[in-house]
Amino acid sequence: MELYLGLDVGTQGTKGLVFDLETSRVVARASSSYGLIDGLAPGAAEQHPDTWIDAVRAVAAELARSLGPAWSGVRALGVSGQQHGCVVLDSERRVVRPAKLWCDTETAAEARELSQRLGRAVPTGFTASKLVWLARHEPENWRRARHVLLPHDFVNARLCGELAMECGDASGTGFFDVHARRFDARAVAAIDGELAAKLPRLLAAGEPVGALDRSGAELLGLPLGVPVSQGAGDNMASAIGAGATRSGVVVVSLGTSATVFTRTERPLVDPDGLIAPFCDSTGAWLPLLCVMNATGVLEEVRNAFGVEHATLTREAAAEPLGARGLVCIPYLQGERVPDLPRATGALLGLRPGLLRRGLLYRAALEGVTANLAWGVARLTELGVAVSRVRVVGGGASNELWRGMLADALDAEVETLVESESGALGAALQAAWSLRRATEKDLPCDALAAVHVRVSGAPVRPDPERVARWRELVARFRTSVGAGAASGGSTGPSELANS
């Protein structure tokens, strides 16, 4: 076997898989769950980076048990990580404080301030505003900080002792020049005069970060010296694992947040700042839409009723399109697109008899889908053709949701044999990085085109439902717009019945 390990360090847990390049199949997988730190201020969302390391250790141990002696034959590994998180280390490389995450909106004021100072949009979720917040609210911690990293960089540092960033993940910081693929000196200085000295080196696409050192080998239970690829932000890794390593492949990733992205050969810059002009991790670019509320909204409904998603999905499928007039505004953690970091959620159009769990689950699905369709409309305005999409992530297994997406986006919806595209992308990147040692000009797509496979026939949009979804999305936008204009998150309930 020719085995490669991919780790995906996410918000709700860490997943790992071992991919056999010879047979093009996953031969082992494992996961470890965790949550956010409880009891924080409103809007704050934090995790301690050591939580990720504990999860990586648990996942590696489970994979080792599953594979037995074959585990020691892993040839290289890669790490995918949640984007935008702010990890600060002291001079001894110890964690200074818990990491503020992508979904943290406590730094909304700092984001607005930076946007005004730089003359361009800096989303609240990006790393930049977290650093301004840290220097302002916890100056002693900022003085202790000697290194600023992103989540997957921190895991890499624990595996091989190297401090580095790659351009894809770095382009989600808010202080990176995506055109020149380097840190933006003006933005760095605007954040803090000491920041430049705290940033790590940048890696070129395909350049490995290093190899397992003694502590990294002990952490994973693998031999000393196993190569470690540069890794990637989760969206960049997912692009590899979903086959968006060539132009024309559009991916919808349904996780705690939802993203839509595609590869381009030049940067795509949105003057309104709603579509992020990211670099990808193969040397091209990855314009990306991110909405902050996706599967987490469905999980809230599941928690409220204590039943499984499969049961709720069956009951939701029995309810009509339009959820009998219920409109769910799913902004449980604020929202990035539209730019409403302080927004809250709402359920409009309630009448007697409508508080049924299946109906509420359908309203939640429709609300998340309508918000996503609103963002995709912005992508198409900027020239991205969306006629067929590949759906990945935890929500990809929901057949009802896939049908909603086909109709709401008026696009064919494909699923993949391996829906955990972040972990698969990390494994394929590891294989690509290793092979480039002898095949310098080998494109990443040479591997992804072979090993990323579509599963079954696509779901095709229905013209009648497409027309109905246009009405639903328009009503959703009106409800959100009315609420934003009045200083809240949603409009008056009568809008749900218009």
Image (tube, grey):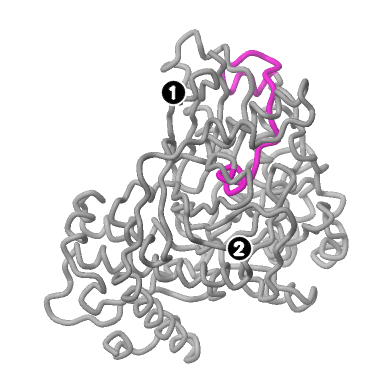
Vertical order, 342 against 230 (above or below): below
The residues colored magenta run 214-239
Most foreground residue, 222 or 325: 325
Q: Residue furthest top?
A: 69
**Badge 2 element:** loop
The residue drawn where x is 47% and y is 85% is: 481
The residue drawn where x is 79% and y is 28% is: 440
Which of the labelled discs sits on residue 268, or is there none? none
When asked about the image quadrant of residue 222, the answer is top right
User: Type of residue at label 1?
Assistant: Ala
Q: Residue furthest front?
A: 463
Which of the labelled discs sits on residue 125, or is there none? 2
- For this view, does 198 lie left or right of residue 457? right
Q: Earlier in the sequence, mark 2 or mark 1?
A: 1
Which of the labelled discs sits on residue 28, or is there none? 1
Please tell me how crowded label 1 is: few (under 14), some (14-19), or many (20+) other residues with Cα within 10 Å.
some
The residue drawn where x is 75% and y is 57% is: 266
Residue 471 rendering spot, x and y as whole percentages: 35, 80
Residue 138 seen in render: no
Residue 469 rendering spot, x and y as whole percentages: 35, 73
Residue 35 seen in render: yes
The residue drawn where x is 55% and y is 69% is: 336
Quarter of the picture holding the C terminus? bottom left
- For this view, does 33 lie left or right of residue 173? left
- Give the total of numbered labels: 2
